[in-house]
Image (cartoon, rainbow, N blue to C red):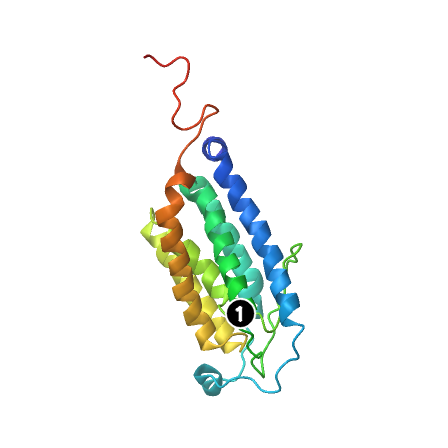
Amino acid sequence: MSSRFSRALSETVQRPWPVAVGLSLMGLSALVNRLANDYINTFPPANESLPDIIHALFQPMDFNLFVTAGEQVVMILIFTYLLFWDTENFPFSFILLGSFFLVRSGFLFCTILPAPFPRIDDTEIFKVALVTFGTRDLFPSGHAGSLLVLGFLIQKDRWVRVTVFILAFLASLAVLLMHVHYTIDVFGALFIAYAVYVFLERHVAPWARQKRNRLGPNRPSKSSSP
């Protein structure tokens, strides 16, 4: 285990700029999401929620523990898997997730939906600095999109990827049955997460996966033969 950790750390250190960019994007997305929620709260809440077929068929059910603490634990496990068993994609995963939440925050500024009612609010179990979520923080679903975008990234192990997609489906179903999100929020998350992944996989991933030494990726070392 110690050798695997050392190898993972060594591989990650050889990609300093992707790590820095990824962590910066994660921090920026948290800040922009907070600003989006503050903007949303400047508008008075609507008196009625929108009609939704899932909400009409089912009364609110409490899956709060699964969609909060459960999903956070799953995210930690996914990053652990990427660090130890898919190290090449570990720095890129932060870029991917941060970009998804930045795009999501843009949609929050564009369209303000009324909160579903009645609903069971998802309570934040582990508070993170700058990260806030509100009752009108709806389109697209962050619960569904964050798992989906990382599921698209996992390619090496088919069963890990399938497991992540199953958990994304269960998280999507849970927020629908809690009446935390509308159906369009969940389906929108699928398409937006896939679009973010495809764009970054094509234009950013090759750079993020490239190893770098102190001399840069394309400069030979002094000891190399002419």
Q: Looking at the image, which is closer to me, 11 or 94?
A: 94
Q: Is residue 43 above or below residue 169?
A: below
55 horizontally vs 159: left or right: right
**Image side of residue 67 versus residue 134, left or right:** left
In this view of the protein, can residue 62 be seen by the observer? Answer: yes
Q: Disc 1 marks which residue? A: 110
- Is label 1 in a helix, a strand or a loop? helix
Quadrant of the image for the C terminus?
top left
Where is residue 5? Give x, y as percent.
49, 34
The residue under the point 63% across, 61% down is 34
Viewer-closest of 165 and 181: 181
In the rendered image, residue 47, in percent from the top left (x then y), is placed at 62, 87
Residue drawn at 51 percent across, 40 percent down: 19
Q: Which quadrant holds residue 134?
A: bottom right
Q: Is residue 210 above or below residue 68?
A: above
- Mark count: 1
From where the camera sits, is residue 154 visible?
no
User: In the visual, does 120 lie left or right of 14?
Assistant: right
The residue lying at 39 percent from left, 35 percent from top is 210
Residue 4 coordinates in the image, percent (x, y): 45, 34
Q: Position of residue 67 (x, y in %)?
A: 54, 66
Above or below, 3 against 26 in this view is above
Q: Is residue 65 above or below residue 115?
A: above
Q: Residues within 10 Å of mark 1 (few under 14, many from 20)?
A: few
Amino acid of disc 1: Cys
Query: Farthest residue in the front direction?
Result: 110
